Image (cartoon, rainbow, N blue to C red):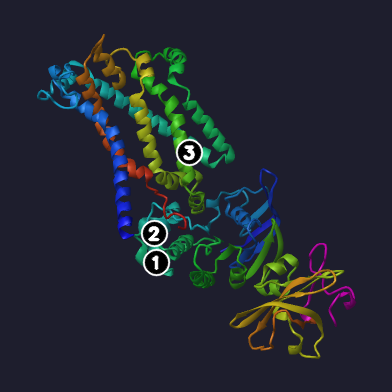
Amino acid sequence: MSTVETVALVKHYDNDVIAVNSIDLHIKEGEFLVLLGPSGSGKTTLLRMIAGLEKVTSGKIYMGGRDVTHLPPRARNLSMVFQSYALYPHMSVFGNIAFPLKAKGLPYQERKKKVEWAASLFGIEQYLQRKPRQLSGGQRQRVALARALVHEPSVFLLDEPLSNLDAQLRASARDEIKQFQRRIATTTIYVTHDQVEAMGMGDRIAVMNHGNMHQIGTPQELYREPADTFVATFLGSPPMNLLNQKECIIGFHPEHFLPKDIIHEESPRFEFPFRVTRVEYLGADRFVYGIVPSESGHTRVISKIPSLVTVPLETDQLYTFAVLKEDMKYFDKKTGKRIDPIPFSMAVFEHAEV
Amino acid sequence: MNRHYWLGKIFKGVMTYFIVGLFALFAALPFYQMVIIAFKSNADFNNPRENNPFIFNDPPTTDHIVYLFEQTEYLTFILNSVIIGVSVVLITLLFATPAAYSLARLTGRLGERLGILIFLVYLIPPTLLFIPMSQVVSFVGLQNSKWALVMLYPTFTIPFCTWLMFGFFRSIPRDIEEQAMVDGYSRFGAMWRVVLPLAVPGVLTVVVFSFMLTLHEYIYALAFTTSSSEKPISVGVTTELVRGDVFFWQSLMASAIIVALPIAIVYNLFLNRFVAGLTMGAVKG
C-alpha cells in the first residue's frame, strides 16, 4: 500500500502532440481513484506513465514518497490489468498467476500456496491447469486480476478491464472488483471511459480531456458541482442540459427539469417553455425529449421524470417546465468554467420567468 | 430445385478436386520421375525411344545408389552441408532475432522502412557478389574451405530471416510484453520468457528457411570450394557425377531424393505449426 503522486506530469509525443498536460494528482493510501475521460483524453497515457511503461517528458511521479519517475516498471512494485488482459498464451492459468512470483524468485512451494490463495479469491481454482484460450472472457478477466494481486503490489493499475465483457457480466464484475479492492485496501487507479462505471466504483474521480485534468472529486461532488461544462456534460445519463444565455451558460440536470405544476409553488424557480418532441418510457422513469425555444435559437433539452409523476405529456405540445433556483448551475461563456454564485441579475434570462 | 442444388454441389466438389488433383500431379511428377530414374538400369534408361520413360521396362536396380555411396564422396558432401547449414542457422538466429525484435518494437514507424531496406539487401544476387566476395574470402584466408560458406551465407540468410521474424514479432501483442515488464521482468527478461516462446513458429520458420537457402546455394559453393572434402552437396554431386558430357543420371537423381526426403518430412511436420496461431487466446477474442 502506498500513496501515488504526480507533480506537473507532462507527456509530449515526437510529433508535438501533447498527450498529458501538466497533471498534478495526489492519490491517498488505499484509495480507489478512477481516471475518466473520452478516448484520446490522455488517461491511459497517464496510467502508463505511472506504470513506467511510458517515458515521462517532464514532471515527477512519487510512490509512497519515493521518486520513481525514471525507474523501470519492475522497480515500482505495482501490478496492472490491461484491457486485453494480456494473459501469456503459452502458459497455463497456474503459470500465468505464478509469473510475477517467479520474477521475485519465490520457491515453488510458496508460489503454489500463493497462486492457490489468489485463485480461490476469484473462484478459478478448477481452471489452474487450463490454457487461456480455453477460458471464457469472464474467466480470463479473473485470471488477470488474480495475477495482478498475487504478489501483493502496493499499487494496482487497471486499464478498462471491463470493456471486453458483455453488459451483464460487466455489472457483476464491477461489483466484484470494488468489493475486493475494499477488502485488500490497495491503492488503485482505474481507467475508464464509462461514466457509470466511474460513478459506481470510484472513491474519487479524475475527469480528463485532451490531456488536461478538468476536475477531481467524489462522484457526488462531480455530479452536483461540476467544475465546467465538459464535466457537466460527461457525467450523468442523460447528461446535464446546457442553455446558452446572453451572459453565461446555464445548466441543469434532466431530473431537475420538471413540469411546473409538480414543483411546490412557493419554491424559487425558473420557468421555461418546453416543446415536447418525443417521450420514452423506461420503467422507473420517463425521458422527455424536447426543445426550449428562444430568440437566439432552439436548444435541445431532456427531462427525466420519475414514473410516479403521471402528468400527461403529448408530443408537439408546448408546456411550461421549471427548474428550482438551487438546482441551477452557471458557467462562463468563454472558458466553460463554473461561475457561482451568479454575478448578475436574473433578468438576463431570455425566456425564464422568475 | 433440390436436385439442382445437389447436382451443383457435386459439380463444385468434382471441379475442386479435379483442379487440386491437376496441381498435385504437376508438383509430384518430377519427384516420381526422379524415383523411377534412380532405380532404372542403364539399358532401360538409355533407350527412351522404345521404352516408356515413366515405368520400369527392365527390372529396377540399386547399382547406382551403391555407386553413389561407394565411388563418390557423397557422405562427406552431406556432412559438409549439415555442418554449413547448422552453423549458418545458428549464426542467423543469433543476429536476426534481436535485429527483428528491435525493428518491430523499438523504432516505431522507422522500423518498417528499415526492415524493407534490410530485405532489399537480400535481393542482390550472389552472381553479382561472388567476385568481390572472393577478395574477402582470400583476405581472411578461407579459400577452398567450407567455413568460407559459413561466413558468406549469413549475408543473405540474416536479411531474409530478419524480415521474416520482424513479421512474427509484430504479430505478438505489445500488451503481453508490457505485462511481463510490470510483472517484474526487464525488457530482456520479457523478451526471453514471453516473446520468444510465442515466436517459436517464427524461429522454426527461420531455421527451415535458412537451412534450405544454404542447401541449394550453388554459386558461392562452386566459387569457394574446390576439393571434395570441402564441397557441400549442391556442388559436390554435380561436379562428381557430371564428367565432361557424361551425366550419371541415376546417381544424380538418387542423391537428390536422399536429401529431399528428410527435408520434405520435416517441412510437413512443422507446416501446421508455422500456420497455427500460438498467440490465439492471448487477448480478448
* Whole-number angstrom distance, CA of label 3 to CA of label 2: 28 Å
User: How many residues crowd mark 3 within 10 Å: few (<14), some (14–19), many (20+)?
Assistant: many
Using the image, tell me which numbered label, if any, was put on residue B166: 3
Q: Amino acid at mark 1?
A: Ile
Q: Which residue lies under the disc numbered 2?
A: A93
Q: Amino acid at mark 3?
A: Phe
Q: Are marks 3 and 1 on the same chain?
A: no
Q: Is residue A187 above or below residue B256?
A: below
Q: Which residue lies under the disc numbered 1?
A: A124
* Whole-number angstrom distance, CA of label 1 to CA of label 2: 9 Å
Q: Are marks 1 and 2 in contact (CB under 8 Å)?
A: yes
Q: Secondary structure at mark 1?
A: loop
The answer, for residue A50, to whether it is visible in the render is yes
Q: Quadrant of the C terminus of chain A?
A: bottom right
Mark 2 belongs to chain: A
Which is nearer the N-term, disc 1 or disc 2? 2
User: How many residues crowd mark 2 within 10 Å: few (<14), some (14–19), many (20+)?
Assistant: many
